[in-house]
Image (cartoon, rainbow, N blue to C red):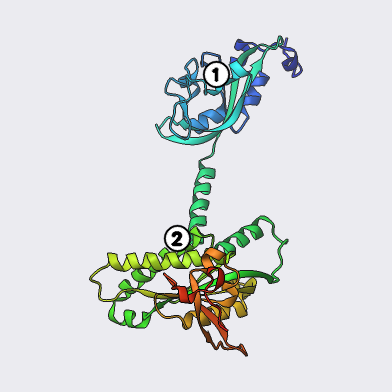
Amino acid sequence: MEKNETDFYKEDITIDYLKRKDSLFGIVLDSIFNGLYIARQNGEIIFWNDGAIEITGYSLEEVMGEKCSDNILVHQDENGNKLCGTKNCPIYRVFNYGFADPVKVYTLHKTGKRFPALTHMAPVKNKRGETIAAVEIFRDISKEEELRLLQEKFNDTIKKYVSNATYDEVVKKIQSPGEHHEEACEREVTVLYLDIAGFTKFSEIHTPREVIRMLNDIFGLCEVITKEYHGDIDKFIGDCVMATFISPDDSIKAAIKILKALERYNRFGEGKETSIHVRIGINTGKVLQGEIGTKDRKDLTVIGDTVNTASRIESATPPDSIFISSSTYQRLSLENSKLFRFHSKIAVKGKAEPIMIFKVVNNPSAEDRGACGFPRRPG
């Protein structure tokens, strides 16, 4: 007498029943696209579906009665540690703890090559609630891994060409399309401008390759130090660097460290025809941050009087020096303000009155200082 489909739910689950490919149970498991196999507590494979054959290359005849550890699958973790025969083996965990969390493993293909697989294992119980076998469902995630690695490489590459603020904004827009507006926002930042002094002369007596190498060296140095002090390179403009900082104190620390690093750079390159010298100008104030450009090509940047003033201060700065505006000086901590003294007033295009400029000094003399150790302010 033939069994109908409801017999599947009435029949007790046994090892012999699990082995059958012609049962409704077996037919259902064979129709699953993912790889699936059933194993006893000792690891012996008693069922191997068509998906497992397709994914691993091992035929039914090659695996039946064998163990996973018998050069079949032989799961490894991401560090290359063998899982089979250890307490981290999914089969061991199912029989000893009643479950095995989904995990990414590296599985052996018949060709001898390993591939990443996402695997999940669960117990198979009989009517008495006894675990008699473990079933593992796995799928090849090679394509997903390739996509993940490609995405990471893409992200790392993009970060080399745009500021952190631009990258973060792009990610937000991708993750939440339609929720962001292109309106500029006002915020207070400290803007640092750095310019290579004598760049035109340098470029005239060096080859284009040497010029590019020098710029990459200096810009790379600036980037590392800027990030160290929580700043963001907004853009590279020819031989200039424009960076923004939330804290004026961080901008000062970064500027001083850049000059010290440049001294070492010039010493290391002793004997070169031309040493590299830079001017640094810093200003603090309100800026507008927003997307500038066209519908097809945009740049997320900061603009405004604060930015322009920082650029003008840098232009007035002698090589190997740091000039800051009074607005930056007034916001510095006591410790950092002691590093500066008043230098002069300069006229800035677009401003009716000259602005006060402060210069960093290595060893301010007593006469340069006012009460409480501050550099004397102009009368």
**Residue at 46% from the left image edge and 63% from the top image edge:** 223
Name, please, the residue furthest toward the bottom. Answer: 352
Residue hosting label 1: 92
Query: Element under label 1?
Result: helix
Q: Position of residue 345 (x, y in %)?
A: 53, 85
Mark 2 surroundings: few (<14), some (14-19) or many (≥20) residues within 10 A: some
**Res. 82 visible in picture:** yes
1 vs 2, front mark: 2
Name the image quarter holding residue 327.
Answer: bottom right
> Is 203 positioned to the left or the right of 10 in the image?
left
Up-down relation of residue 123 to residue 205 (above or below): above
Q: Position of residue 221 (x, y in %)?
A: 41, 64
Quarter occupied by the N terminus:
top right
Query: Element under label 2?
Result: helix
> Is 338 positioned to the left or the right of 175 in the image?
left
Which one is nearer the viewer's eye here, 195 or 341? 341
Which one is nearer the viewer's eye here, 234 or 250? 250
Name, please, the residue furthest toward the left. Answer: 271
Up-down relation of residue 199 to residue 171 (above or below): below
Up-down relation of residue 348 to residue 82 (above or below): below
Residue hosting label 2: 224
Label 1, label 2: how many angstroms apart (C-alpha)?
A: 48 Å
Name the image quarter holding residue 317.
Answer: bottom left
Mark 1 surroundings: few (<14), some (14-19) or many (≥20) residues within 10 A: many
**Residue at 55% from the left image edge and 62% from the top image edge:** 164
Q: Position of residue 179 (x, y in %)?
A: 73, 61
- What label sits on residue 248 in the rendered view? none
User: What residue type is disc 1 on?
Assistant: Tyr
Which one is nearer the viewer's eye here, 52 or 302? 302
User: What residue type is disc 2 on?
Assistant: Val
Which one is nearer the viewer's eye here, 106 or 54? 106
Quarter occupied by the C terminus:
bottom right
